[in-house]
Image: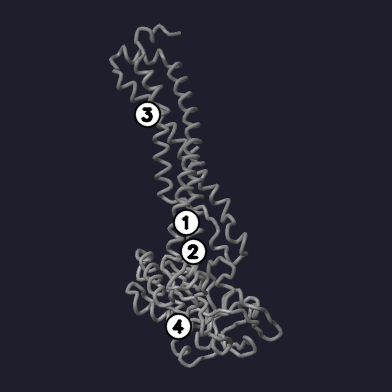
Amino acid sequence: GIATVVILLSYGTGLERAVVAAFEAFGTKVIFVSPGRTSQQAGGEKAGKWIRLQLEDMELIQASVPLVKNVSPESRASFRLSYGTRSQEFEVFGVYPVYGRMRKMDVSEGRWLGAGDLLERARVVVIGSEVTRRLFSERAAVGEAIRIGGMSFEVAGVLRKKVSVGDSPDNRRVFIPFSTMGLLRNTRYLSSIIVEAESAAVHTKVVNEIRARLGERLGFRPSDKRALGVWDVQEELDEVRIITGALKVLLAVIGALTLAIGGVGVMNIMLVSVTERTREIGTQKALGARQRHILTQFLAEALLITFAGGLLGMCLAYGVAWALGPLPLWSAFYGEEAREADIILRISWQTLALAAGILSAVGLAAGLWPAVRASRLDPVEALRYE
């Protein structure tokens, strides 16, 4: 029973860790703002107006929303990348250098985009780990020249492999300076604006301020959710934690019920023990033992049995967790690059503490009635028992 409790609780914790890790890859304080279409009438214009974002809108957010720490434009499009005889289509993103820090873009080789690259319209590129594998295989990519849309770019860096889920994970993306993106496509209108809040605690206020400021400038109501597509990573994380928390409670209840069944077995064992030792109890009482002495004796025996089984159960849980290893979650959908976000059964001290608490409650409940029954035996009748 205790093995079931520990394994279920560690599974719930592992699932929460895996889901949260996938979302944290986007940056915990990041808000994605993308253009949309109005669904409410505003300023004398009918609903259905297309909203387009420009650099001026990004600068307005940075200047007028005080809780914003960093911003970056994002202009993206699919291009065919070529290296030697290899050629494949990937999504290319034109961004500011600060984008890397906002989105936790760590490089394993080379460097990230710099301020000089942006000013000089440098033809440099940072590529994801999956892009590197497909174009270069085992060869070093940094310093090599690849072609994007017919133009030559130097590989400045390779992104560290990260847990990233979605239609186009970061491992399969390519990043170039925003100014250089203008050589490949028209960047007048942005694909999205990436905003980093000062802290995760103020994300809701930042979202409301962005809607209010851009609503004034672009002519839509701040309450019109369709005018701007806003994806708040922190809000998603909060919802995920609520769902996984509820799941952990459910798993704990299931484990506790399983453990309670084991507690019924302990109670039956103790009741049989009371019956078999009736004459012994009578002798103890005849020699001066009081009710509390008999009660303590049998209750301690029940707890000893329960905790001995609990200790073996915890050892069994550790063995099962070690034998199972990582359980597929994101890797089942996105392949080996997402294996870091699979479910790992790690048994924490919090899990053991909770399991021990449940075990103590079951042990007390299982031993209390047999102990009370033993303590209430009449010594004369007990000595007569055959």
**With respect to residue 63, does 207 lie above or below?**
above
Left or right: 361 as drawn, with respect to 139: left
Gap between marks 4 and 3 measured at Cα: 73 Å
Residue holding disc 1: 240
Q: Do the residues labelled 2 and 3 touch (CB within 8 Å)?
A: no
Residue holding disc 3: 300
* Quadrant showing the C terminus: top left
Query: Which of the two discs, 3 and 1, labels the residue nearer the N terminus?
Result: 1
Query: Which of the two discs, 4 and 3, labels the residue nearer the N terminus?
Result: 4
Given the image, on which type of amino acid does mark 3 rest? Ala
- Marking on residue 55: 4
- SS assignment at label 3: helix
Q: State the image coordinates of residue 64 (x, y, percent, origin top left).
A: 34, 77
* Residue at 57% from the left image edge and 51% from the top image edge: 323
Residue holding disc 2: 23
Given the image, on which type of amino acid does mark 1 rest? Val
Given the image, on which type of amino acid does mark 4 rest? Leu
Left or right: 203 as drawn, with respect to 118: left
Gap between marks 2 and 3 measured at Cα: 48 Å
Q: State the image coordinates of residue 204 (x, y, percent, origin top left).
A: 38, 64
Gap between marks 1 and 2 measured at Cα: 9 Å
- Return the residue nearer the eye: 318 or 211: 211
Query: Which of the two discs, 2 and 3, labels the residue nearer the N terminus?
Result: 2
Gap between marks 2 and 4 measured at Cα: 27 Å
Question: Mark 3, mark 1: which one is toward the viewer?
Answer: 1
Given the image, on which type of amino acid does mark 2 rest? Phe
Q: Are marks 1 and 2 in contact (CB under 8 Å)?
A: yes
Query: Which of the two discs, 2 and 4, labels the residue nearer the N terminus?
Result: 2
- Return the residue nearer the eye: 95 or 204: 204
- SS assignment at label 2: helix
The colour mode here is one colour
